[in-house]
Image: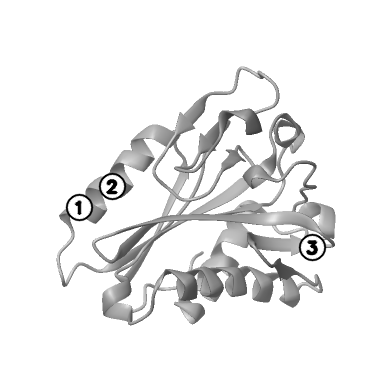
């Protein structure tokens, strides 16, 4: 189970949910929140979908696969979401927490790095390429939107999924970028177990 909700932060496990209504729900939550609205972390999976960030270029989608492509309002280029991948949406008030988007990115990356380290996997950042990498292969992607000083979107961590769709894109705009997942790194935890563990690391970082 995820950790008990700390003061001012609610953790919601949503299961597998369609991308578009979830994106609209994040926008609605952010637009309607007030100064005292508790922050939230959403843990979920999506059915297969490619998402194209605000700076996204269609040429980074290399092959037609039949998987939907949704142009969205986060930063970054193209990525893939699908079953077996943990998606974590971070809906927090940065003004209230006293740090900016660069520090938020650092904290999100560190939560993943610390989670993997617990299981003996050495992970790192790469300069100019937000996310978390193991041996040069991307295991977690980040993409955020800040509106009114509050964040939405978040990160995705590959756990036990079909990685084939990544071959149809330049992941995050990087040609030939390798991808990996926690099961390939010898971490046998289920997606729910990984989600609960990552939620604890995020609470510690945020």
Observer able to see residue 7 = no
Observer able to see residue 87 = yes
Label number found at residue 134: 3
| CB-based contact (under 8 Å), mark 2 and mark 1 | yes
Residue 92 lies, in percent from the top left, at: 33, 67
Residue 167 lies, in percent from the top left, at: 76, 33
Tell me the element at label 1. Answer: helix
Residue holding disc 2: 27
Colour logic: one colour
- Residue at 16 percent of width and 71 percent of height: 35
Residue holding disc 1: 31
Q: Earlier in the sequence, mark 3 or mark 1?
A: 1
Determine the CA span between mark 3 and mark 2.
32 Å
Question: The C terminus appears in which quarter of the rendering?
Answer: bottom left
| 177 over 130 or under it: above or below | above
Quick check: 201 left or right of 28?
A: right
């Amino acid at each position: 189970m995820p950790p008990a909700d700390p003061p001012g932060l609610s953790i919601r496990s949503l299961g597998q949910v369609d991308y578009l209504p979830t994106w609209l729900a994040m926008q609605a939550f952010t637009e309607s929140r007030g100064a005292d609205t508790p922050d939230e972390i959403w843990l979920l999976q999506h059915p297969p979908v490619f998402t194209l960030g605000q700076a996204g270029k269609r040429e980074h989608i290399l092959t037609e696969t039949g998987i939907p492509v949704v142009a969205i309002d986060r930063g970054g280029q193209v990525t893939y979401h699908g079953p077996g991948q943990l998606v974590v949406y971070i809906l927090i008030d940065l003004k209230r927490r006293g740090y900016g988007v660069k520090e938020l990115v650092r904290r999100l990356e560190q939560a993943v790095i610390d989670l993997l380290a617990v299981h003996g996997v050495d992970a790192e950042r790469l300069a100019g390429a937000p996310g978390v990498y193991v041996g040069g292969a991307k295991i977690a992607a980040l993409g955020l939107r800040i509106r009114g000083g509050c964040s939405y979107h978040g990160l995705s961590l590959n756990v036990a999924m079909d990685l084939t769709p990544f071959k149809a894109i330049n992941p995050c705009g990087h040609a030939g970028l390798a991808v990996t997942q926690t099961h390939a790194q010898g971490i046998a935890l289920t997606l729910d177990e990984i989600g609960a563990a990552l939620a604890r690391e995020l609470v510690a970082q945020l």
